[in-house]
Image (tube, helix red, strand yellow):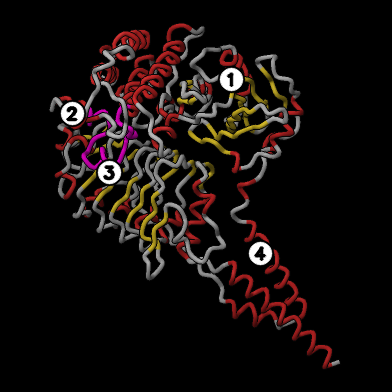
Amino acid sequence: MDGFLAKLQGSLLLYILILYSQVNIIGALSPDGQALVSFRTNIVNSDGVLLQWRPEDPDPCGWKGVTCDPKSKRVTSLSLSNHRLSGSISSDIGKLENLQFLALYDNNLYGNIPPELGSCTKLQSLYLQGNYLSGVVPFEIGNLTELLNLDISSNSLGGNIPPSLEKLTRLQGFNVSTNFLVGAIPSDGILHKFAKDSFVGNRGLCGKQIEVTCKDDSGGSSNSNSDSGQNQNGKKKASGRVLTSAFATVGALLLVALMCFWGCHLYKKLGKMDRRGLIMDVGGGASVVMFHGDLPYTSKDIIKKFEYLTDEHIIGSGGFGTVYKLAMDDGNVFALKRILKLNEGFDRFFERELEILGSIKHRYLVNLRGYCNSPTSKLLIYDFLPGGSLDEALHGRSEQLDWDARLNIVMGAAKGLAYLHHDCSPRIIHRDIKSSNILLDGNLEARVSDFGLAKLLQDEESHITTIVAGTFGYLAPEYMQSGRATEKTDVYSFGVLVLEVLSGKRPTDASFIEKGFNIVGWLNFLVTECRQREIVDQHCEGVRAESLDALILVAIQCVSSNPDERPTMHRVVQVLESEVMTPCPSDFYDSSSE
């Protein structure tokens, strides 16, 4: 009997050791890697960049956007700008103790800036501009005494500028513009050296830097968010204790083994959780409404296809939702935009507006085919355009668009927007004109997409305000201040789009930010220097001087700070047709002659 028990204990011990070794193998990812896995878990949508992050790797140094010290393998840089990241920033980002560079700008991130970032005391550059971050500026940012560059502009941050930022004595670049900050700007330390451009677009701020007298002469206000945040460095129990307690009884041993087994199983599943099909989001009782009767599909045919859609089918993602490529059995391909349901009582409003949008057809607009009325999310069915987006064509491909292709795209986008403003019934203000919302067919003909969605997702009961409709860098100044969208705010966004096409650079490109500008500021600077032609993309072939000058003039008028000075889109189309599209064919622009 004693021999039998000895063999049983030996077998169970061996089993535990095997499982323990599996946990070590699976859990071999470095602490920095685990912190980044937590970061990824908080991201609900992206352009697919995070699918390359594998928890089974020993360290994250080969992951896209991640740079490590070659010796210590500690993460020193996380750069994920312009990847359509949607979600909140995990507090575990503060565990990257060796982080020196963090760039998450121009995404769709929301929620608070985690106070735990104050633990990254080696951080030298922090770029979070161009997102939807809210809450206050964390007091703990003042702990980052090595910081050289801090840009949190073009968000929805409120409250005061914390006095702790005065301790950032090494700051060379600082920008909190275009937020909702209030109170006195601290002026006793480093912040006094930064000019007005670092603070504009915050209606509640006052201080010497912006030449606004504070009503309270007693000085700056402090940030009420002085709590440093709770320490979340939970410690794992030593594996030796597990082994010791396992021998207390056979029952306890088997329980530990079972828990280990399921823990390993769940851990292996991590990273595959976001590859689920859409069928679970459709639910029972869903139906498909088609606006045009030329498609031979039933609701059951289409809904069945949702079961096979995963993140691998994502072709786009943005503020309005995630877009999937939907291929039917007969070879027809559509674009499926998934929008989460906002609130109760939204269905009737949603369906009424979609009926209007589905009735609008135009050569330069993306055709809305129908929608799936799901209890848990809204699925819009559009025509699929094989050329992708203008954003991809300008910034994501090695093959550059030539001058004629760029002019044709600008012309198509202008005609589509002009139709929305002046010719369709009811007239529609787009509210989110940008390069990712200009889609291209196989011949690089432009189509305006996502028209009407900004209004669609802002019924009166929604907590979402008009100020978040649109993308920072494209928004008109008066829209940022008042939140009121007009045709002229669309015209401004179109002007920014023209500048993006001309320059080949995004509106908030790093090269502009380093000079303290966005693309409109850069244009204005070049105009004052009579060097406006320098904004043209040097890699663009076939540029003609006369059409270039005419197009720059159109852009200048569209991005005027005074809405009354901006032309209508009908007028823009007229000028493009008469002065830009038909210049003297022999008048080629040679940048080398400048």
Comes first in the chain, label 3 or label 1:
3
Q: Amino acid at mark 2?
A: Leu
Q: Which quarter of the rendered picture does the C terminus lie within? A: top left
Whether residue 203 is visible:
no
Q: Which quarter of the figure has residue 144?
A: bottom left
Q: Which residue is mark 4?
A: 263
Frontmost residue, 319 versus 218: 319
Residue 75 position, x and y percent, is 40, 61
Q: Is residue 166 above or below residue 584?
A: below
Residue placed under numbered mark 3 in the picture: 161
Residue at 23 percent across and 18 percent down: it is 587
Q: Amino acid at mark 4?
A: Gly
Q: CA distance from mark 1 to mark 4?
A: 45 Å
Q: Where is mark 2, residue-wise?
A: 526
Q: Amino acid at mark 1?
A: Leu
User: Is residue 524 something one can see in this rendering?
Assistant: yes
Residue at image coords 34%, 8%: 574
Q: Earlier in the sequence, mark 2 or mark 1?
A: 1
Name the foreground residue: 22 vs 194.
22
User: SS class of the residue under badge 1?
Assistant: strand
Which element carries disc 3, helix, strand or loop?
Answer: loop
Q: Which residues are magenta?
A: 502-524
Alpha-carbon span between mark 4 and mark 3: 44 Å
User: What's the CA distance linking mark 3 and mark 2?
Assistant: 32 Å
Could you classify mark 3 by the number of other residues whose Cα lies within 10 Å: few (under 14), some (14-19), or many (20 or more)? Answer: many
Which part of the image, by quadrant, shows the N terminus?
bottom right
- Earlier-in-chain disc, 4 versus 3: 3
Relative height, residue 434 to residue 47 (above, below): above
Residue marked by disc 1: 368
Image point 19% across, 54% down: which residue? 169
Mark 2 vs mark 1, CA separation in Å: 41 Å
Q: Are marks 4 and 3 in contact (CB under 8 Å)?
A: no
